[in-house]
Amino acid sequence: MLLADRDVEIVADRGFNGRVTHAEWSAVCEHMEREFRSDRYLDGAVKGVEDIGRIVARHFPQLPGQRDEDQLPNRPALL
């Protein structure tokens, strides 16, 4: 997120190549950016995470008996 410009970019892992279209990722970004332009930063961020969660679950569903544990740290990556 570039808050000064209210701009969002998703950099997806290569595991999503060929699975998720550019249009799907763009729709998530646009949804978040609309919220940000209206100064609803928390709502925009939460809705973006929820949208991405639905996309991830569609392509990589949790397997029966699989624990819901993180494989990577939950802190934001500052670039």
Image (cartoon, grey):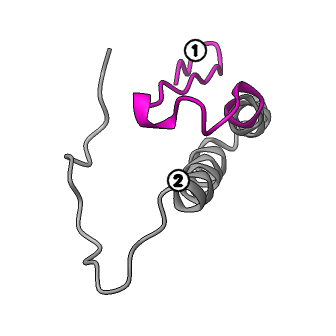
Disc 1 to disc 2: CB gap under 8 Å:
no
Q: Residues within 10 Å of mark 1 (few under 14, many from 20)?
A: few
Image-based side of 40 in relation to 15, left or right: right
Of the residues shown, which amino acid type is indicated by label 2?
Answer: Val
Residue drawn at 42 percent across, 36 percent down = 15
Q: Position of residue 74 (x, y in %)?
A: 26, 49
Tell me the quarter of the picture where residue 5 sits: top right
Of the residues shown, which amino acid type is indicated by label 1?
Answer: Ala
Q: Position of residue 58 (x, y in %)?
A: 60, 60
Q: Is residue 13 visible?
A: no
**Count the marks: how many?**
2
Residue on which the image places disc 2 = 56
Image-based side of 27 in relation to 71, left or right: right
Compared with 2, 76 (above or below) is below
**Helix or strand or loop: what does disc 2 sit on?**
helix
Q: Quadrant of the C terminus?
A: top left
Compared with 8, 39 (above or below) is below
**Helix or strand or loop: what does disc 1 sit on?**
loop
User: Foreground residue, 70 or 40?
Assistant: 70
Residue 7 on the magenta segment = yes
Compared with 48, 76 (above or below) is above
Q: Position of residue 43 (x, y in %)?
A: 65, 52
- Tag shown at residue 4: 1
| Magenta residues (range) | 1-25
| Residue lying furthest bottom | 65
Residue drawn at 52 percent across, 25 percent down = 1
Give the prevailing secondary structure in the magenta stretch: loop
